[in-house]
Structures are given as C-alpha cells and as structure tokens.
C-alpha cells in the first residue's frame, strides 16, 4: 500500500485535512495521528478505510491513472448537459456601457432583431437538445444588446413557451430569465413577467456615482442609475422575481458593500457579480496593474462572503460552494463549453452570446446538430483546468471551471489564454470550502 500521487494536504492548528486532487472529499484527522502513520504505515487508524475509499491509499499506480480518466470523463459529461438557451432578441442597445462589446458590432448588426420564426426554430432545436438529456431543469434567457428593444418577440415567446410546456414538448422545469437594463420595462411587461414567472435580472454597476460613469444612455451619455432603481422598485411592487448583476469595473471596485445596502433596502435577495472581461479589461486596466486589479476584484467578492458567511446571495460564491458540497468537481464557470445554445438576433447559431461562432442559421441546420458536438466547443474545452498548463501545480484545481473563452479571444486573440480572475477566484474559494465541513473551530479560522 502507498500514497496516491494525488494525495494533498493542508494543516490548520492540530488538524490536517487530506484530499484527492481530482475529487477532493475532505478527510479531517489529527495531525499527530497523520505524523505517526507516515512514520509507520502498518499502524491502524480508523480513518484508513476512508483514505482507501477516496483513492488516497492505493495498491498500484493504475488506480491513479484511472482517477485521471474518470475526472476527465466526469468533467466532459457535465459540459454536455443542455442547460441554457439564449435568445438574443435584439443586437442593439439603448445603453452604451464603456466596457461592453456590443457597440463594437457593425451598424448593420446593431439593428437586428430576432424574428418570431427564428425564435420558434430556436425553441424547436432546444427541445431536441433537452429531450435527449436527463436534465429536468433548463433555463431560457432573453438577452441582448437590450432584449426589450424587441418587445414583440419577447411577448410572443412567453406565450409560445407556455404552450410548449403545457403540451409537454418543453419540460415543466423550463425556467425563464430576462437580462435587461430595465429602462424599457412597462406595467404590461411587468405583469407578463409575473404571470409567466420570469426572473428579471437588472444590471446595476455600483451606487449612483459609480454606475453613472459607464452605464449611460447611448443617445446622450446621461447616467442611468435613477431610472434603473425606479424600475427595480416597480418590479418589486408588481411581485416580479428580480435579481441584480454588477460588472466589476475599476469604477465599481470598493463600492460593493455600499451597493449591497442599497439593494437590500429595495428587497433584492439575489445578486451576481461579473468579472470584467475581454477588451473592456484591457482598455480600462493597464498591463502592469492588471494582476492587482484581478486580485482586488476576487478579494472584494470573497471578503463580502467571509464577512457575512452567506453563500446564497452572490451567484458565483453560491455556485462554488454548492459544487464543493455536492461533489460536482470541475464545475461550470461558463456554459459556453457545450451547455448552452445561443440564437443570435439574425438567426445565427453560436455557443456564446458575445461571440459569433458562425455555426449556421437556426432554420437551416442539419437534423443531427447538437451544440456540444461542434468544433468550437471541442476547441474551447481544451481550456479545462485538467489540461491548462497554468493549473499543473495547483492542487485546488477541482473547484475550477474553464473561465471565459470569449474574454481570452477578445482580449488576447487566444482561446486558451488563462482567465486569471476565474482561476484566482476558484482557487481561493477552494481553500475556504475545504474547511467548511471541519469538525471543530478550524472551520472558522
Ligand atoms: C450584454 S448585457 C445584455 C443585457 C442588458 N442589456 C443589460 O444591460 O443587462 C448583459 C450583462 O453583460 C455585462 N457585460 C457587458 N460587457 C461586459 C464585459 N466586458 N465584462 C463583464 N461583463 C460585461 C453587462 O454589464 C450586463 O450586466
């Protein structure tokens, strides 16, 4: 019997936690026992069975080889489950946020709106994806640009999706989300969102003085905070489920606690932070300051979690903690690796709402088309922490996903460039998660 090459260890006070690098189910033992065992591996301790069960004590190297094959297979399988259909209702936007890639699109593309026919073709294709998987839950996200520039197709889709759910062609567990800047919402749309149980996610980039620096109207450059907050309050009054998302630009950094208070005052209970991505990051943060900006962004999210202990409020923290607790290792950072189908405003199909993968028009695809089997997905999956050389010596890699490939392409012209924010965030969350189930005071240190 010998120790696995994947055996990893952390110490805290009198306790050590042992874990397998590829499936880190934590085993907490007394440090003094572990030291004794290492001196004499014939000694018996009652945790030895657990170490064997987790593949930390092995008879031959073949066990380790198999563990790597299994981890890769598990990660690949979870990336093939259909989870999200994006319907890009409008490519254009009435905002011009300084970091957003949408204004860089050509004038012609900006005016594109998704037709009802293409929306239906997208739903037909999505039904095929969903039917073949065992997943009973999936999301349809209305996105843009600003999706409410195309209210007609939005209202049509709500009826169409309800019809498909009631005749069984879409699962009843199909949930809907509208990602919007909120300003074009009216009473009628709010009441439709409530009736159809659509979660409305509004972008708010910090308190007013911060938000209004970059989240501005396209026509006159005026700030948008007051208008967004007014709509957020109206949504609450109408009983619509709401969430807020913030893009963490240099202007927002340092203001999340203040925003937190403002959002709690208006009753927001779900919140998500986006790390700044793509050229937005390159343009706004100089190369020499980039790593410290990335680290500060990660710290800001994690410090908030550390100070409140509340894992259910902020979406990225919640995802990592849940993945660790449910042992869903190599969790999904982004659904672009085969979990999502994107129907662009012109009917083109892609795997990412920010990226035109040019996979063909939705109405003209072959019967056998599945997003998880496309070339772009195959290429992007090579970013996996199991293959990315920058993760080679990181033994917390099992809580990492693949970060954002679009960001790497947009910023560095290379789909395999490491997404540093996603990487640092995952590794730090791993160190926290590892001690959450510790039996004593070590867990809170
Ligand atoms: C593209 S917008 C579309 C929906 C809607 N118009 C809105 O304002 O929320 C969706 C989200 O993407 C975020 N976003 C845009 N560009 C980004 C970037 N470069 N990095 C991170 N998030 C970005 C926006 O802040 C917004 O929350």
Image (cartoon, rainbow, N blue to C red):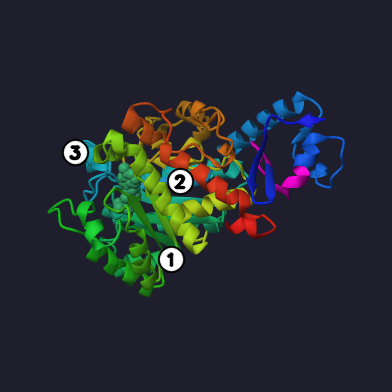
Q: Position of residue 48 (x, y in %)?
A: 82, 42
Q: Nearer the viewer, mark 1 or mark 2?
A: 1
Q: CA distance from mark 1 to mark 2?
A: 20 Å
Residue 267, given in percent of the width and then of the height, sits at: 40, 71
- Identify whether 66 is placed above or below 278: above
**Residue 210 in the figure: left or right of residue 315:** left
Q: How crowded is the residue under tag 3: few (<14 C-alpha within 10 Å), some, or many (20+)?
A: few
Comparing 381 with 259, the one in front is: 259
Categorize mark 2 by other alpha carbons within 10 Å: few (<14), some (14-19), many (20+). Answer: many
Q: Is residue 26 magenta?
A: yes
Position of residue 386 relative to residue 342, above or below, is: above
Determine the residue positioned at 32% across, 52% down. Answer: 253
User: Which residue does the numbered mark 3 point to in the structure image?
Assistant: 107
Give how far across and how far down residue 430 sits, in percent. 56, 45
Residue 22 shown left or right of residue 153 in the figure: right
- Residue 361 seen by the camera: no
Which residues fall within the magenta stretch? 19-34
Q: Which residue is mark 2?
A: 85
Name, please, the residue furthest toward the left: 220
Q: Is residue 156 magenta?
A: no
Q: Residues within 10 Å of mark 1 (few under 14, many from 20)?
A: some
Looking at the rendering, in which quadrant would you find the N terminus?
A: top right
Q: Which mark is residue 241?
A: 1
Q: Residue at x 26, y 60 (%)?
A: 184
- The picture quadrant where one finds residue 71 is top right
Question: Which one is nearer the viewer's eye here, 394 or 226?
Answer: 394
């Amino acid at each position: 019997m010998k120790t696995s090459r994947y055996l990893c260890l952390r110490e805290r006070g009198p306790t050590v936690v042992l874990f397998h690098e590829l499936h880190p189910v934590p085993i907490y033992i007394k440090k003094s026992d572990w030291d004794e065992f290492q001196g004499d591996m014939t000694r018996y301790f009652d945790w030895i069975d657990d170490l064997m069960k987790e593949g930390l004590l092995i008879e031959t190297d073949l066990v380790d080889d198999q563990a790597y094959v299994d981890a890769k297979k598990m990660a690949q399988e979870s990336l093939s489950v259909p989870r999200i259909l994006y319907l890009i209702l409008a490519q254009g936007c009435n905002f011009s946020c300084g970091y957003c890639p949408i204004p860089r699109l050509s004038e012609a593309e900006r005016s594109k709106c998704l037709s009802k026919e293409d929306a239906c073709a997208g739903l037909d294709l999505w039904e095929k994806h969903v039917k073949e998987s065992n997943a009973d839950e999936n999301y349809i996200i209305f996105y843009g640009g600003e999706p409410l520039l195309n209210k007609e197709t939005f209202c049509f889709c709500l009826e169409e999706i309800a019809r498909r759910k009631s005749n069984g062609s879409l699962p009843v567990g199909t949930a809907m989300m509208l990602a919007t800047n909120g300003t074009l919402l009216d009473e009628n749309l709010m009441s439709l969102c409530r009736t159809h149980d659509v979660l409305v996610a509004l972008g708010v980039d910090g308190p007013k003085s911060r938000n209004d620096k970059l989240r501005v109207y396209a026509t006159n450059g005026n700030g948008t905070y007051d208008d967004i907050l007014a709509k957020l309050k109206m949504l609450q009054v109408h009983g619509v489920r709401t969430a807020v998302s913030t893009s963490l630009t240099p202007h927002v950094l340092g203001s999340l606690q203040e925003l937190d208070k403002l959002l709690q005052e208006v009753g927001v209970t779900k919140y998500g932070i986006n790390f700044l991505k793509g050229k937005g990051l390159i343009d706004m943060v100089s190369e020499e300051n980039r790593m410290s900006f990335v680290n500060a962004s990660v710290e800001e999210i994690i410090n908030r979690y550390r100070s409140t202990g509340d894992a259910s409020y902020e979406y990225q923290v919640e995802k990592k903690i849940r993945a660790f607790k449910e042992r869903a290792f190599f969790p999904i950072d982004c659904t672009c690796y085969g979990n999502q189908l994107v129907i662009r405003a012109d009917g083109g199909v892609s795997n990412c709402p920010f990226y035109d993968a040019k996979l063909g028009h939705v109405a003209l695809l072959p019967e056998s088309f599945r997003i998880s089997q496309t070339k772009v997905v195959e290429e992007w999956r090579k970013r996996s922490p199991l293959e990315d050389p920058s993760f080679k010596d990181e033994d917390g890699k099992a809580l990492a996903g693949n970060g954002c490939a679009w960001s790497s392409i947009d910023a560095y012209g290379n789909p395999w460039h490491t997404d540093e924010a996603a990487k640092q965030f995952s590794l730090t969350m791993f160190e926290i998660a590892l001690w959450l189930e510790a039996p004593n005071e070590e867990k809170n240190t």
